[in-house]
Image (cartoon, helix red, strand yellow):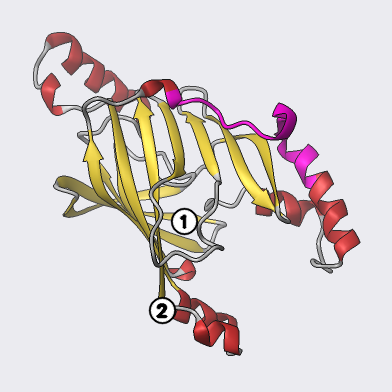
Amino acid sequence: MKQVFAFLASMLLLTGLGAQDFITRGKIEFEVKRNNKRMQAASGRNDMYSQSMPEFDVSYRDLIFSYNQLLYQPGRRSSTSSLRIYNDNSVYTDLDKQQLVAKKSFLGDYFVFADSVPKVKWRLDNETRKIAGWECRKAVGRIYDSVYVVAFYCPEIIPQGGPELFSGLPGMILGLAIPRYYTTWFATRIEIANIDETGIIPPSGKKNKLYNKKELAEILFKRYKEAGWWKDATLEKVMSSISNYTL
């Protein structure tokens, strides 16, 4: 599907038929909204800390893209975002190579690691809705075999990316919901002019050290064991946590 879509888009651009309707560069602001109350209730927590939390955490992330190069990073601060949800996690994605470089916080430290782009099993739907003024189509996906994801993608925006580590639909994902995580991502504004593409580069970490997933898992597995924070941790479980679809 990806190859067919890319071919049709390139033919339109070459012939000039409707080329102005297709977007290859831009900046998208996503509002990330998490329902704290429902998440705490689902986990069985009912302590004073969980009761004092606001019902919703709201934060903002920016996705800057140029053709198949994307950078998802922290956006403007929200007055309702907690320290937990606001972080410096970011991810650079090369859709042509299906590779990513992510900066993610583990145990209070930031690590940078390289990985392949996660695959989502998508099923396209006929439902449509407008998001940030753009017509989008619905798709339903599945991750970890049992976690369902609802997405809305815009075919007019050519790169097949989206927020967090989500991709693989015939257009840019502008809306996303994971019911089990009680979290949604929706585009609030989209800029397609005066985009600074020079910043679309992989994130860097301490001493520019870049790990692969196995190397990082071995480091974290040892730290978890020493701290006693994840008693039933295995190397496989730690590797899976590194590949979590949400940053």
Kindly identify the residue that appears in the image at 31 percent across and 35 percent down: 27
In the image, residue 48 above or below residue 108: below
Q: Is residue 137 above or below residue 170?
A: below
Q: Measuring 55% from the left and 47% from the top, which residue is drawn there? A: 88
Q: Residue 135: where, in percent of width, then height?
A: 15, 46
| Residue 161, horizontal then vertical, whole percent | 39, 37
Nearer mark to the viewer, of 2 and 1: 2
Q: Is residue 144 left or right of residue 148?
A: right
Quarter of the image with the N terminus is: top left
Residue 100 vs 190, above or below: the answer is above
Q: Can you identify the residue that label 2 sits on?
A: 55
Q: Quadrant of residue 208?
A: top right
Residue 156: image tag? none
Q: Residues within 10 Å of mark 1 (few under 14, many from 20)?
A: some
Q: Is residue 189 magenta?
A: no
Residue 142's disc is 1
- State the residue at coordinates (70%, 52%): 106
- Separation (CA) of disc 2 from disc 1: 27 Å
Alpha-carbon neighbours of circle 2 within 10 Å: few (<14), some, or many (≥20)?
A: some
- Span highlighted in magenta in the image: 199-217
Q: Is residue 73 above or below residue 16?
A: below
The answer to whether residue 205 is seen in the rendering is yes
Contact (Cβ within 8 Å) of mark 2 with mark 1: no
Q: Pick whichever of labels 2 and 1 is earlier in the sequence.
A: 2
